[in-house]
Structures are given as C-alpha cells and as structure tokens.
Amino acid sequence: MGCSQSSDATKKPGGGGGRGRTSSVPMSKKEIGQRIESIDETRTAKFGGVSVRYAYLSQRGYYPDDTHKPNQDSYAIEHNFANRPNDAFFGVFDGHGRDGDKCAHFVRDNLSTILAQSMTKAREQQPQPQLDLSKDITQDIILKSHLQCNRKMHVDQDLDDSLSGTTSISVYLHGERNRITINNVGDSRAVIGRVANSDNKEAPPANSNYSNPSAASTLKAFALSRDQTPYRRDERIRIRKTGARILSLDQIEGLEPIDPDEAERDEKAHLDGGDGTEIVLGEEIDEGGDPPRVWSPHGDYPGTAFTRSIGDAIAEELGVSSVPEMLTREITPEDKIIVLASDGVFEFLTNQSVIDICAKFTDPLEACRAVVAESYELWLQYELRTDDITMICIFVDDVDTSEAILRQSALKCSVNTAEVDPEAMASLGSGDMEDEKCDELISEMPRPVRKNMSLEKSRALQTMKANFKSIRDVTEESEEDFDIESLYNEKTDEEKARIAEAIRASVVFQNITDAQRELIYKVMCPKKVKKGEWIIKQGTVGDQFYIVDEGSFEVRILAENQRDTDGSGGNRVHVYEGSRANHSHPSFGELALMYSAPRAASIIAQTDAHLWALHRYAFKKITAEKGARKDAEKVLRKIDMFRSFTSEELKDLTSYLCEAKYGRGDTIMKEGEAGDSLFILLPGGSCESVQTADDGTSKITKQMKGDDFFGDEILKGGSEKKYQSTVTATNKCSCLILQKTDVKRVIGSKRIGTTNMA
C-alpha cells in the first residue's frame, strides 16, 4: 500500500517537541526549513478513470511565546486503499489543545485503518463482493469509522483528549466510479476548482500555464465542505440544546455586550425555513480575530471555535461531536484542482483566492508552497503569531468517463452473468439509482475572511510607534504635491503577469477595476537591491508596498521589550523567496497602503534581488479611498484648528491617520502626559473622559461615542502641550490617530504660522 504521512514533530531534528520553552536565538535558514515538511516531488497516480498529480506541504507556525511548540497539523495519503488498487484516501488533521499534536497523529494513524477494515468487511458481507458499495452504505461506514476513532481516542493512555482534539477533512477517492466522498469534522476545508465556462467544450487541463491572470480566472472555486463553527445557525441551535453558551472571548470577559434575544432569533429563522448556514453571528465580532465559541453553562470552558471535532471529551458533552458531514459526487472533466487544507489557510484567504493561486502553477507542489507562503505572510501581517498551515493539492489531469460508464453498465445490466448474480443486481434496482445521485456543490462562504489585525497586533504596533517615534521611512512631500505621473513606467506583458500573480490574493486589491489595475502596473517602480540591504526596519513608519520579483529576503522580528543589541534585527521567522521560473512572487508591507503604521518586522535581502514597489499615495490616488477616512474629514472640520482648511487639505491630513484598537479598560491618553496625537473614535466604540479636580478627586467630564474626538489640545500653542484629561475605553473600540508631527509635515510652515501651532 502506497502511503504518505506527516512525521512526529518530537522526532524531527531541530523541530523541538517541548512545550512552554522560549528562545531569543535567531533561527537559521536551515531551521526555518525544518519548520516545513513536504513531499520531495509531485507524485503522479491513476485511480480508475481519474489521473492525478498531487503534493502536500505542512508548515509549523510561529509562536513568539513558545518557539518550540510542535506542529499540531498532520496529514495522511494512502494508495490501494482497503486493498482496492483504484481507491485512495487523503486527509488533513488540525490538532488543538495541549495534546493537539498527539490527537492529530492519532487520527492520522487510526482513522484510515478503521475505515479500510470496515469497507473490506462490508464488501465481504455482500452477496457479490465484487459489487461496489452504494453511496448510502459507504457514507454509513465513514460515519461509524469516525465515531469508532473518537471512542478509541478517549481510552488511549498516551494522550489526554479532555481539552484537546483535532479537526479532520478527508477524501475517499473511488476511482472505478470516478467518485469522491468528502468527510468533514470541524473547520478545516475541502475546495474544488472547476472550469467556469460550461460552454467551453475544450476544458483546459490542470497543468495549463495559468500565469496569465485572465486564464486563471477561468476556474471557479466551490466548497466541498461546510465549516462546522458557531457561525452556522443550524450548529448554534444544535449546540444550545445541550445547555451550552455561544459567546466570543470579549463577551465572556465583559468587553462586548451579550444579545439575550439571539437564541430566539435563531430558532425563529430556522422555523421560517432558513437553510441554517447564514452568517449572522460573527461578521462584526470577528473583525479582530475573536470568533464565537462554545462554552459550558457552568464555567468558562472549553471555548472551542468549532462545533465538531474528534477528541475534546469535555466539549463532547456540550454537543461538539465527531459526526462528519459528507458530500459524494463524481469527478468530471470540468474538475481541475482539489484542495484539502487546515483552517490556517483560510483565515485570510477566500476559497477563490486559494484556487487562483494554485491555478498559476503547473506543479501542485509549487502551488502548495505558494498558498502556504501567502497564508503565513498574511498571518505575520495581521497577527503576532501564525497558525500551523497544512495543505494537500490535487491536480486532476484526466477523467476517463467511458470507464465509469462501462463499470456502471456492468453493474446495472449484468452483462457477465457468470461474474454478477442477477438477484444481487436486482437488489440494486431503481432505488439504488436514486441513492447514487451526486450531492450538490456548496457555493456560499462558510465564515467571514479576516480583514483586520487583531487587538494584540494593534497594541504591539502602538508600542513600536512609541519606541521608534523619531524614525520614519516615508516620502517627505505631501500627498497634494505627490506627482503620480512621475512614477509611470511601461511594463511588458510578462512583468504585468508577475505583478498580477502577486496581488491577486491580497484583500487590498480584490475590488479594483481593470482600469485601476492597469494604472497600478504603470506606477509600480522597479527596485534593485544588494545582498545585506535593509528594505524595511521594524518600528519605522513606511509608505511602500513591495513585491519580490526575484531574490531572497529574511524576515526578522524583535520581541516586545527586546533590544537589537547585535544589529541583526531580531529573531529570523521567515524567508521570502521570489522566483520568475517558479512563478513565486511574495509581497510585504501591505498595511502601508492603507494607513501610516509602524512596520511589524524588518526585511533584509539575503541575495542580490529585484523588487517592485508601490507607494501609498499612488495607490490612494488610483483607488480614490473612501469609508472611515472620508468620514474622518468631517470630524476634522469640527476641530477649531482645521475649520478653515480646504477639502484637499483635509484629505491630505487623513492620509496620515493610523488606526489603533483598544480593549475595555485600556487608557488611550493620560492627563498630564506630554501629548503628540489627537484621536477620533470610530463608530461602535465608547470612551469616558476623566479630569482631576482642584481637590484631587477625579470627575467624569464626558461620555464619548463614535465620531467624537479628543486630544486636540496638543495642537494649540506651546512647545510641549500636555493632555488635559485621561480617556479610557469603556468597551472594545478603535480610534484613528493623527500625530502632531504629521500635521506639521502636511500643512507646512505657512499654515502652521497662521494657526499658532508650535
């Protein structure tokens, strides 16, 4: 039996299996490579009428507080499944909790074995063992195998699954029927990329060169599984029947209000005929990475962000079950790419983005590398850590429908009565034809994709800004004076294709028009760099977004309160590898396009290299930024100093606004401290302002809500103005911050002189 499995992290040299250890020693490139486990080269296989090429890759996450935390993801691939040469099994398992790695390895080692044994036994018990198992029988075996694996884990003495477990996404590929059955427990995911144009009789093969952006878009992504999380109304209703609570962490901690009518609304919507999968809960609550979770009615545990898993014995009492949802369908010539991946891939990437990235490559291993790298890089941008990320990518090269038709004909019509008993065939009958109908594909998004950084990341950036406030890496001219046409430089079609590859998955570029995309191509500036050159320094405020066209760059991060005593830039956590030959073009500095924010890491060239750079001013002029910053112009006009400013001057000011997040009880500014910023409270937040009276007592002077501003006293005369009150967040909120130095820089000496600003 051909078999591929993830290895145990505790056995990998340099991988580290301990828990709770930290290290300040920078990782070498070799050690970073040891975080990645993958197939050596893409494997080709034929399962009945389905010819495929597949690859897999798993990257251990970066956890700054536990740098040796083992990879809790695992995977398994088996050929000749259940002693059937045309059958195969593919699975990805995402562990969680203290023994999450052990739980994922347990399911890797046991689920497919239990399933294979059960299928073999079921065939032997049929009147004619050579007959295929029906869809219903197959799904019943898969269901019972998951439940048996779960029970077996509960009694295993080598792990503790009381508060640990694993999600599971697997595919049983039955080549004689050109059929797959997807089995999902939890929030890992299966996605298929299909030819979008049904009128196209000549469907492009999976190994077509999709480096042309328009070619890649011919594949449309469909979900083969639904995430089982509290985002789903039907799952919330099911979980609540056990008495469990559905709340976010902020709601548990009292930082966000609890809606007492939510459960009643869910029940009513369900009775009114809702399909159960509508995303109602969480679209606002998860903006900062705070999803709804399952909690006991008796205490603040277990807090799972999924509603099904294998293991999790305590959560099982609250309805978190190991029952899989299954989808069975035939593979057709229109099906080109199948992806199985842990939820770390889909935290910031949509299903369509994943398929678009895969479609750029002729080799599924390169597709795995690109998707995992893009996911990892987005985690670094929006979080202080990254998740473990695992992916199996299958390219469907050919589907021989004639073989499947002949197989069904032999079964249904009993062409060879010496081999197939007519009574056994009669037992299949018309009911079996109904049973064998394919399940429909899933088109809706299972949960929101994260678009904002977490509260912890925002706090870390504010700390960096305070520590590095004198260091800037921005253009000295104002946005009004910025000459976008001076950046224009023509690109070849090949260069445009490489830029398109790099920006396709980015949230920032997802809604741009074709005309805007062409302008972005024109203003992308080529930048040649030498080995050892620092492109970005952590903590500095920058205004450039970069695409790696060719070359290698290391990512280094200084931990909180860590000093760069040796000038290395801190711990090396990642390496960007750009290659024209491999269609690999990672990017970094994306946040600089949205607002003036400190760089979260240092980027240093490891080789001579070539970059494409995009300036924030150019991006904003092309996309005509709207939303919160447009509303901020109205707020700024209410401030005495800015009342006489023109719309263009106010727009110029808003380009320097930086968004920061605060938790309930956080002090935003403190009375008596030297001030350097004014704040605009965004809608949805609330704060209170407190001043010290003459007798030393504190008095609440104002309750503030969205679009209120404070700290503007620092803009008035005097060389060092101090804040006149203390402002504290009374719930989770976000503020737009405008620094005094930015006001000086944008407005210029003439305006400053007339407004008496020191």
Image (cartoon, grey):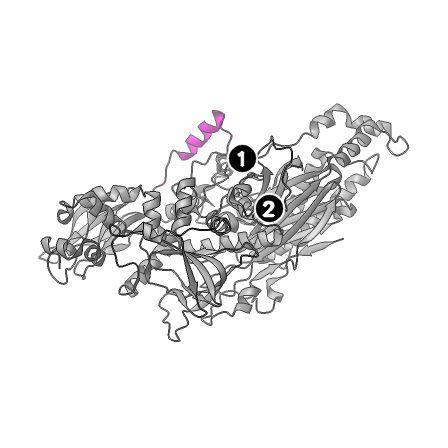
Q: Is residue 200 above or below residue 703?
A: above
- Whether the residues at callouts 2 and 1 have beta carbons within 8 Å, the answer is no
Q: Is residue 580 above or below residue 323?
A: below
Q: Position of residue 451 (x, y in %)?
A: 41, 46
Question: Which residue bears the numbered disc 1?
Answer: 443
Q: Position of residue 8 (x, y in %)?
A: 62, 61
Can residue 663 be seen in the rendering of this structure? no
- Considering every residue shown, the one lying at the far right of the view is 418
**Mark sitting earlier along the chain (2/1):** 2
Looking at the rendering, in which quadrant would you find the C terminus?
bottom left
Q: CA distance from mark 2 to mark 1?
A: 15 Å
Residue 417 placement, left or right of 719: right
Which contiguous range is marked in magenta?
258-276
Secondary structure type for disc 1? loop
The circle drawn on residue 427 is none
Question: Which residue bears the numbered disc 2?
Answer: 339
Can residue 418 be seen in the rendering of this structure? yes
Q: Amino acid at mark 2?
A: Val
| Residue 723 location, quadrant | bottom left
Q: Amino acid at mark 1?
A: Ser
Q: Is residue 266 magenta?
A: yes
Q: Position of residue 50 (x, y in %)?
A: 71, 42
Residue 65 placement, left or right of 220: left
Mark count: 2
- Pick whichever, 683 or 358, lies toward us: 358
Secondary structure type for disc 2? strand
- Pick whichever, 319 or 56, lies toward us: 56
Q: Is residue 206 magenta?
A: no
Q: Residue at x 42, y 51 (%)?
A: 490
